[in-house]
């Protein structure tokens, strides 16, 4: 029976299928944001599983449905265990399940961390390209030298051909050095240098991407920032409410980002409202807002990371895997039940 078959798509195959497809992924993410803005998605709140004896670790479930021509539903189940680095393992691991829109049965299981990283980076690059700026240079600052920011740099490079230099910082010196070597290998035309600290990056860079494992605000001063800087606040918990209030804030979904003790959630709790958020990225993509009150102010994009992006990209990956013969078929996954 066709409904009794499940397909498995492994991480290494997904890496190869998506290699060099940055523009297609950005287009998928942009289209999904538009569908979300047009209310053609269903997006329940993410479910956080936390542990009373270890605040750094967490597991998150992101169910979602994407309508329109995509027409896909499922869930991403992703864990973040920063201590994995000491075990030579990636911090994040994930699976994505795609369900049949006809029967509701799981149809495909995909390794999810690659898809998650690439959709995150694509949304950051799309925001950087879409939000207006007043450029004073072509230097990118990276705070947090992990997988996410490596993908962010790759996607930014695909969207902005005038990038000349990259300055990066991580509390782990070894991670900074390893990041520098990887960047020099992949982007030989870029000047790739390690920064002595976060204030130095604020001072020298006009576009900054922050992807750390911080669980509470640790950045209390951005006075060194350049005029009109754009900050991609991917890790969501790095800035104090006072910093948030000093910026033009753009989010992916205001209801989702103002929860789970994000910097914006803390700001809402302090002010009692959400008026500090200018708009959602979908509003800019649809021409409803520029996202900025004035170009001289810092602009901060804080994406919660929407499950609709994971499902839309997973659907694209499944199509590629099927056409390439890279799906592993599991024909007897479901029990055989007589009607």
Image (cartoon, rainbow, N blue to C red):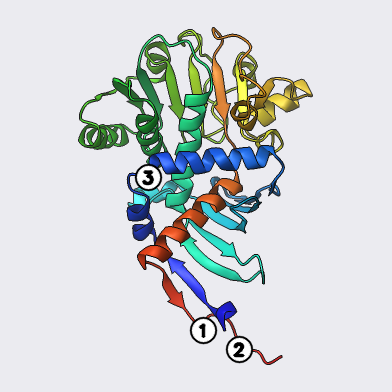
Q: Quadrant of residue 180?
A: top left
> Which residue position holds label 1?
332
Dot 2 or dot 3: first in sequence order is 3
Q: Nearer the viewer, residue 204 or 15?
A: 15
Image coords of residue 186 (percent x, y):
24, 37
Disc ID at residue 336: 2
Describe the element under mark 2 as helix, strand or loop. loop
Rendered view: 224 above or below 182: above
Image coords of residue 223 (percent x, y):
50, 9
Dot 3 or dot 1: first in sequence order is 3
> Which residue position holds label 3?
21
Q: Quadrant of residue 189?
A: top left
Q: Nearer the viewer, residue 216 or 322?
A: 322
Residue at 38% x, 58% y: name it: 11
Q: Residue furthest right?
A: 272
| Mark 2 crowd level (few <14, some 14–19, many ≥20, 10 Å Cα) | few
Describe the element under mark 1 as helix, strand or loop. loop
Image coords of residue 96 (percent x, y):
53, 59
Q: Nearer the viewer, residue 242 or 160?
A: 160
Image coords of residue 105 (percent x, y):
63, 71
State whether residue 230 appears in this view: yes
Q: Quadrant of the C terminus?
A: bottom right
Position of 79 compared to 277: left or right?
left
Q: Are marks 1 and 2 in contact (CB under 8 Å)?
A: yes
Disc ID at residue 57: none
Residue at 47% x, 25% y: name it: 129
Position of 315 compared to 248: left or right?
left
């Amino acid at each position: 029976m066709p409904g009794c078959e499940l397909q498995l798509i492994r991480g290494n195959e997904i890496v190869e299928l998506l290699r060099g497809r940055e523009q297609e992924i950005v287009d998928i993410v942009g289209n999904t944001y538009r569908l979300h803005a047009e209310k053609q998605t269903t997006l329940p709140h993410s479910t956080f599983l936390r542990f009373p004896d270890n605040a750094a670790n967490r597991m998150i479930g992101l169910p979602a449905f994407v309508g329109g021509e995509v027409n896909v539903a499922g869930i991403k189940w992703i864990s973040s265990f920063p201590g994995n680095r000491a075990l030579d393992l990636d911090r994040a691991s994930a699976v994505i399940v795609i369900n049949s829109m006809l029967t509701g049965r799981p149809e495909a299981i995909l390794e999810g961390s690659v898809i998650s990283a690439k959709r995150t980076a694509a949304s950051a690059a799309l925001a950087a390209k879409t939000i207006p700026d007043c450029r004073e240079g072509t230097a990118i600052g990276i705070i947090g030298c992990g997988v996410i920011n490596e993908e962010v740099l790759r996607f930014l490079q695909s969207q902005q051909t005038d990038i000349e230099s990259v300055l990066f910082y991580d509390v782990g010196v070894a991670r900074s050095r390893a990041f520098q070597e990887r960047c020099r290998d992949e982007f030989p035309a870029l000047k790739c240098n390690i920064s002595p600290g976060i204030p130095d990056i604020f001072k020298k860079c006009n576009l900054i991407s922050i992807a750390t494992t911080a669980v509470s605000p640790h950045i209390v001063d951005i006075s060194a920032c350049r005029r009109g800087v754009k900050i991609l606040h991917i890790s969501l918990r790095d800035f104090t409410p006072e910093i948030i209030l000093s910026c033009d804030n753009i989010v992916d979904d205001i209801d989702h980002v103002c929860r789970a003790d994000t910097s914006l959630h803390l700001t809402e709790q302090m002010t009692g409202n959400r008026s500090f958020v200018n708009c959602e990225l979908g509003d800019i993509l649809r021409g409803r807002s520029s996202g900025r009150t004035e170009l001289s102010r810092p602009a901060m994009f804080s994406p919660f990371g929407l499950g609709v992006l994971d499902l839309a990209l997973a659907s694209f990956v499944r199509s590629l895997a099927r056409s390439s013969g890279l799906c592993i078929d599991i024909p007897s996954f479901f029990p055989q039940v007589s009607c």
